[in-house]
Image (tube, rainbow, N blue to C red):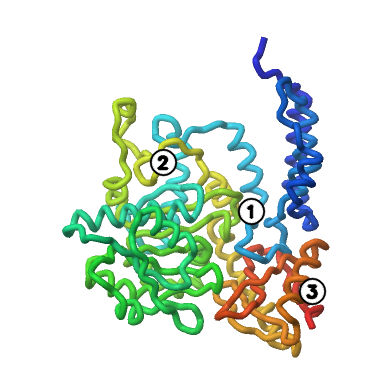
Amino acid sequence: MKPFPFPASLVIDMLSWTRERILGGPDPKHGAQSKDTLDRVMGGSITESGIGAKAAFDLFTDTIVPSTRPFGHPTSLSFVASAPSQAALSFDAALGAAGIFAGNWDGGAGAIHAENQTLDWLAELAGWDDNSGGVFVAGGTLGNLCALHAARDWKARRMRRPNRWAILCSREAHSSIRAVADVMDVDLIEVAPDATGRMSGEAARAVWSREVFAIVANAGATNCGAVDDINGLAELAEEHDLWLHLDGAYGLAALADPQTRPIFAGIERAHSFIVDPHKWLFAPYDSCALVYRNAADAANAHGQSAVYLDTVDKSHWNPSDYALHLTRRARGLPLWYSLATHGTEAYGNAIALTISTAQKIADGIAANDNLELILGPQLSVILFRPKTMSDEQMVQWAEEHRRSGALLCLPTRWHGRMVFRLCIVNPETNADGVLKILNTLS
């Protein structure tokens, strides 16, 4: 007798639901529910004898999914949303069923080879050579941590360790950089950016100290879209033998658009970067591409050894050598499949379209007498504020339109003021439709 009997008919039902979800997309009216609300329906779902396959799947379709925010919808414009292609979503479902272990070449050779093709494409966009390489990890925070661990190891091999190491970054750096500094027990030296949120090499030079082992540059700051002065920061890094890491979790995807690529001038001089496919490269959660200009530097820091790993084939590429992990799924494959399906030109065109949409929305905001365009678009981020609304009215307006499914546009803060922030990463977002909703702000 099988320990986990499962009806074949429900496999068909689950695949049918998956098909409809992929083709139809999420419901924009879905959203978080309170714990008490969820407990009234889902409480007691884990029992000694089980509630049965159909009942459990009904909880998923009828309660769990409707209680999540639909970041993949074209009207979801807060945070940095996800906009996975149907190709990537479809493949992700197949990938889960394949059950591939992609921690080393022995277990996942074909999958790893495909992932590496995708990483090579990103490295080529950055102007890097065959010495580059990397790995897909779970998200930008882990990608930043792994890159900066490699950076400290690299620096420690080149100089005597100081009493305290330090990372230099912009005040507009993502919160993960502060978290990484805490985990690594190093100091964080923050540089004041300019009025647009951009850190210059000159400003960084003014606060540099000998304890610094790495500079983290924004390649598309989450809150404002700013791209730091990469060339200026590279000069500082080269002068003092520092590692330059680019946090491009959101913005570095714009490398795929030839018209936008010059914004990242100097990237060829960086030592590492991250970019999240689940943000602006049209892949599902969760995936972060971590790429090193010289992959050997990462292997020096991350390679693990143990008697139970002695049988691992070291003559081929093992993803476990390039980040803080051993076990991993082949999370880069949905991006590979979508790229292989549609081609890199389609990706560049889709990103260019989102940037054009952001510009149209910004132009409409600027032309609206009731709205103040504060910043942008920088890449595809726009900051604005209604001229006559209080902070409380802004929060209420955002919640009403979130619940109706019309628009997910939430407040943030910029230079101490509450403002609305839009981030356009979905090529299906309609500028006229967004502006029609924003016209209700007064």
Which amino acid type corresponds to the residue marked 3 in the rendered image?
Answer: Ile
Depth order, front residue of 151/181: 181
User: Which one is in front in this view, the residue at disc 2 or the one at disc 1?
Assistant: 2
- Across and down, in percent, residue 118 comes to 47, 50
Q: Residues within 10 Å of mark 3 (few under 14, many from 20)?
A: few
| Circles 2 and 3 in contact, beta carbons < 8 Å | no
Helix, strand or loop at mark 2: loop
Mark 2 or mark 3: name the one nearer the start of the chain.
2
- Across and down, in percent, residue 353 comes to 63, 69
Depth order, front residue of 111/56: 56
Mark 2 or mark 1: name the one nearer the start of the chain.
1
Which amino acid type corresponds to the residue marked 2 in the rendered image?
Answer: His
Which amino acid type corresponds to the residue marked 1 in the rendered image?
Answer: Pro
Where residue 237 sits, quadrant-wise, is: bottom left
Q: Label 3: which residue?
A: 437
Mark 1 or mark 3: name the one nearer the start of the chain.
1
Where residue 209 sits, quadrant-wise, is: bottom left
- Across and down, in percent, residue 199 comes to 41, 77
Above or below for 103 versus 211: above
Q: Is residue 359 left or right of residue 437?
A: left
Residue displayed at 60% across by 63% down = 80
Residue displayed at 31% across by 77% down = 207
Is residue 389 in view from this perspective?
yes
Q: Label 1: which residue?
A: 84
Mark 2 → mark 1, Cα distance in angstroms: 25 Å
Mark 2 → mark 3, Cα distance in angstroms: 45 Å
